[in-house]
Image: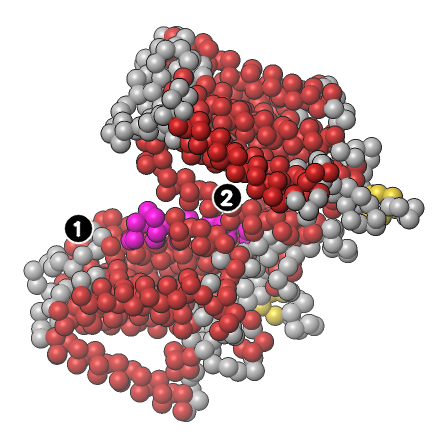
Amino acid sequence: MEKVAKTSQRPVFGWLIAPLAVLIAILANYVDGLMSIDVELNSDAMTPFIVTGVAGFLAVTPRILRELGTLPESISQTQISLAMFVLALVGSGVAETQTDGFVGFTFFVVLFGGYLLDTKERYEWMTMLIFAGVGVHAAIDIAAAAAVDSYLPSSYEFSEGQEYPVSSFQETALGFVFFTWFTVFPILGLLVGVAGRGFLSPAGDKGWFAFNKVEGGWNREALPLQIALFIWAGAHLATIWHFDQGSIADRLRLGGLGGVEANGFVGYYTALLTGIIAIIVSGMVAERWFTRAMTISSLWVLYLLGAWYEAGFWTNETFSESWAPLIWLAITFFVGVAITMIGNHEKYGGWSNREEHRPSGARQFWNAHWASLLTAVAFLVGLVIRIQWYAVPSMHAMGTDGFDMTGGSDPWYMKRVVDYILAQNAHLVVDADRFYPIGGINPRPPLFSWSLAIGAMILQPFLGEDAVWWSMLALPAIYGALTILPVATIARDHFGKAAGVIAAWLIAFMPAHVTHSTWGLADHDSFVMLFIALGFMFYLRAVKYAGSERLVRTTSIRPIDMMRAIGAVAQERKYAMSNAVLAGVAFGAASLGWKGFVAGPAILFLAYAAQVALNMFRRRDSTILSTLFLTMLLTNLLIALPFYAHPQMNLMLDGTGLQPFLFILLFTVVIMYITTGFRDKPWLLVLGTLAVGATVFLSALYVLKVTNLSNAWDVLFTGSGYFTKTKIFGTVAEANAPDRGYMFASFGPIVFVFALVVGLTSLWRAFSQRSQIALVFAVWIFAASYMS
């Protein structure tokens, strides 16, 4: 791999980055002032720019002073970091008192975050952060200036002379203005960071831009990327110009409503996709794939022209006649002919691609980061999908402070719990309105509602009384999008990078997951799925690095020998034990969000029991696996106890509480005690002992059931009732199995069938290759398919 030589540059030039960002913010306000948006550049508007610019100026100061020799070498990096943290904290407090909380927040993030990025030699990202910090204030100012009746009114008079509220259309348009400008500034920041690499900041040899070699003062090697970023920013600016040139009906996109004739405007995603295409083309140019670059770019331009014609942005009588399709076909054909002629021209064409052993920086970057990049994009796309479709409608409800939630009555009860937490700083245990007028216990575990309350506390300085609504609406979608990351990690760890990327995009678009993790669905579904996925991710890592070696020479049923075996596992398999503990923490968090969390550990227990049985036949030691699984369960138990053992909850031995989990824990302890204590005995004796113990235990449970002394038998064999159709559980949505057609459609028939195929192949690998991971996947797939 070709490393980067740090280019000599004058350190003081780094101080120009923040002033440049402030200057561009002022210019953005001035440009909008030249259009129809009346932006006032007064002290109130300028102060956030300057404050954030000062933060960016201070963020690079330690490095510049160190390079100038002004900062003594005796001052360690730790001392500087501590001083910068204190400065960011104090400065944000001062900024908050003089302006508002959001300005103080951006001051802290830009100063300390920029300093950390600068210290880690991520200079391009540092520049991007400074521009983003300044740009968010510019975007807020411009959007606020656009929210006037003369530009974007909240009500509109239609052709019949009647005036109707159009606030939802107004907020959609304001969102376009804000996010367009907020996108422009990070792009410009990245452009400045790339173009100024080796000039405004050193050419670092770490991170995404390590493959960009700089020779001389200007980063010429990255010229295609710089042009692409310029086109991307220009595309967004062009959409703002087109937005401004339209009528009020166009800006509000009222075309077709009440006889209004309006074509709308180009929109945000057109510019976004144009920028992505530009980045892709720049990579092709860097690899000297000029023919492909011309083909992709020309096809995109043709698509844009056709889409804009269909939208009515431009007209031509020729294209409205019957032979219009043939004209478009001819244009496409001759564009292709022109590309072919240029590519084969003796003077302008005939270029050769880069040789495989001399790839461009773009190719090296792609080879190193393609999986993480595509996974990050999947996360962003998944987040947008979960937010956009319901964001605006959720803020225009009647009778509920203007906000609304989806998903039935459960989110509204969550809102009641969160309101109580914010008012009393305590969890709602006894709810006087349950079983009114007697009152009753709030049966919901606390962690999800507390996460919503903490989110509201964090947002309160910025949003005031609406903070609780924003937290309730947004966090479920964020939890849902975050689930993409552990799912992708599981696939990447055990099937490769490509599988990780495919898994990320599948879960991002999967209807069954999207419908339960949308904006406004303030129920525990997305929260629980996130932590159960994290639990599986950590446990699978633990099993992957567990092994089946004999770490102790002899074992027995004496407690001291059992503890010695467990200690040997903790000493020799530290990484696996750490992941087992993290798995327990994840399942513990899920247990504090949903009482049905035991579904996750139950699936893993089936895989664990099956693996122990196979190990007995194969004369392999199960001590490591048993220790890891027991560690996970005990960690989970310690986290869950404060809630489930609460005297008012009385859920320790309840069938809908911790009883199923305690069964799993008991079975694990018994299996580990017998298989580890009698490890060196004949496997038939060990298996017989387990069979006799299980028979006696189950017989006792059945006798207790027949005599109506305990329902433990039903809890154990019906999944706390979830797998039996009763009148009570018929009223619980998650207890009812979906129709097969709905289930196939939710996952996609091809994906569902492919999952079953992977389950069968994993089962085959578990026997043929003796793979513990493969057995976990096989049991997981088939058990989850049955449970769904």
Amino acid at dot 2: Leu
508 in relation to 788, above or below: above
Which quadrant: the N terminus? top left
Q: Residue at x 47, y 68 (%)?
A: 744
Q: Position of residue 22 (x, y in %)?
A: 59, 18
Q: Nearer the viewer, residue 374 or 709?
A: 374
- Which residue position holds label 1? 572
Left or right for 364, reference 249: left
Could you give the CA–CA distance between mark 1 and mark 2, rounded to whole angstroms? 40 Å
713 in relation to 79, above or below: below
72 falls in the magenta region: no
Q: Determine the residue located farthest toward the right in the rendered image.
A: 161
Amino acid at dot 1: Glu
Q: Nearer the viewer, residue 631 or 480?
A: 480
Q: Residue at x 74, y 41 (%)?
A: 263
Say which quarter of the image contains residue 63.
top left
Q: Position of residue 26 (x, y in %)?
A: 65, 19
Q: Secondary structure at mark 2?
A: helix
493 falls in the magenta region: yes
Q: Residues within 10 Å of mark 1 (few under 14, many from 20)?
A: few
Instruction: Give whichever of discs 1 and 2 has the lower sequence position.
Output: 2
Q: Position of residue 100 (x, y in %)?
A: 65, 29
Q: Is residue 567 visible?
A: no
Magenta region: which residues? 476-500
> Which SS type dominates the magenta stretch?
helix
Q: Secondary structure at mark 1?
A: helix
Q: Nearer the observer, disc 1 or disc 2?
A: 2
Left or right for 486, reference 108: left
Residue 380: give its label: 2
Q: Is residue 19 visible?
A: yes
Q: Residue at x 45, y 17 (%)?
A: 196
Left or right for 43, reference 284: right
